[in-house]
Amino acid sequence: MASVNLRHLHTFGEVARLGSVSAAARAVHISQPAVTQAVAGVERYFGASLLIRRNAGVALTAAGELCARRIERSISHLRDAVAELTRGSSRNFDFDATRLMRSAHLYALSAVVEHRNFSLAARAQHVSQPSVHRAARELERLIGVPLFEKTSFGITPTREAEKLARRARLAFAEIAQARAEVHALSGGESGRTVIGAMPLARSFLVPTALLEFTQHYPEHSVAIVEGTYEHLLASLRSGEADFLIGALRSPAPVADVVQEHLFDDPLSIIVRAKHPLLARKRITVAALSKYPWIVPRAGTPLRSHLHEMFATAGLPSPTRAIECNSLIAARAAARKRSHHVVVGAPDSLRARGWVAGRATASSRRRGAPDRPHDASRLAPDRLAASAARYRATLFCRSSATARATRALTQLCDEVMTRTQRRKSSLRILRRRNFP
């Protein structure tokens, strides 16, 4: 993909705002032929006609309206970043520094922040190290704020550099999504959506929904990334991921993230076949406390439900526990003739080949299969008095392609309906200015 010209985007934004090439030329202090050339460059980049030329001025096409909104939001990210970095600075900032920025400046900065090293950044960008160094230093002089500092590890980016790089990634993501939306107007569905998937969501819901999505939109690229909630949330806010799917956090984690409800999934207590607990007619919380557990890491919603279950019964939480966020590893540990107990969402576990069926007296007489059992119905105190639910949440950011995200959200809901979930509770976390 060709690199976008930020100055051309600025110029097109002025034409769209003022509705006139001559007025835009005066606003950006260049000639009318230069404005016309800039607009032509933007139209080539997006592959569509963005303006309708008239005697009284210009008007935006449907594609032009899409681009104008995205470009304005993209430039706003950069302006807000510069304003934040220069707040309190003694330097006079009567001019708009973003008008002098080039894509090379921001690409170089983002690469250095990501790799923490000029040489590695140059290698990742497939350019020479002096080119990266020169572009990054030009940006530093342009905004008048130190972006790099000397340390014992060499020259490293400052916090200000990290803030600007995050905004730059969001700005470029807006432009990339504008390009995808313009292509969608002509009947295509190009573009790329990156989904951050947390453990239970990625075992069942995400693969099922994506298989259907790719049938409807075969030209739209989708990537799934894994990681901890904190890491994925940082990727969402920086523009590296378009949305996340995982357990609901209450309240919402940060002010610029929004949650939208999709579905609830009841939690279950899972044990291996022939586990001693299955010999009981009724399972109490006190009985559960005597066995080792395989639990999610501290701070996760599932772990909180587990603590709540024991606290409601007046018992301490299990101390003999293996912290594990991997369903594959938890399943392997639970099947090795151990006495470990696992908590999880039953349909997500069933998708991994976990659950053979409810553990009832009749099934035990016939002989239990090798796969782990859902022992929840034998427990009078189901997780926190039956109130616990896997509250899956879809977290979207503002640069996600609106059409693709809506389609994925709808498919997630349809998947849950078809599999007869009791009540759907996945939520969407997205940036507040998501359209």
Image (tube, grey):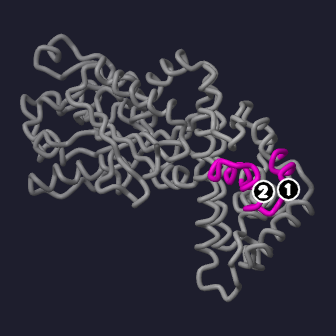
Q: Which three-letter amino acid code belongs to the residue tagged 1? A: Ser
- Residue at horizontal 88%, vertical 66%? 134
Number of dots carrying numbers: 2
Q: Quadrant of the N terminus?
A: top right
Q: Which three-letter amino acid code belongs to the residue tagged 2? A: Ala
The residue indicated by pointer 1 is: 31
The one nearer the camera, 301 or 332, is 301
The mark found on residue 266 in the picture is: none
- Residue at horizontal 52%, vertical 50%? 236
- Residue 225 location (% of width, % of height): 56, 40
- Residue at horizontal 72%, vertical 39%? 55
Mark pair 2, 1: CA separation:
6 Å
The residue indicated by pointer 2 is: 25
Find the magenta span and give its range. Answer: 10-37
SS class, disc 2: helix
Q: Residues within 10 Å of mark 1 (few under 14, many from 20)?
A: some
- Residue 27 location (% of width, % of height): 73, 62
The one nearer the camera, 360 or 119, is 119
In the displayed structure, 164 sits above or below 386; it is below
Residue at the front extreme of this rendering: 55
Q: Do the CB atoms of the residues marked 2 and 1 lie less than 8 Å apart?
A: yes
Image side of residue 137 versus residue 78, left or right: right
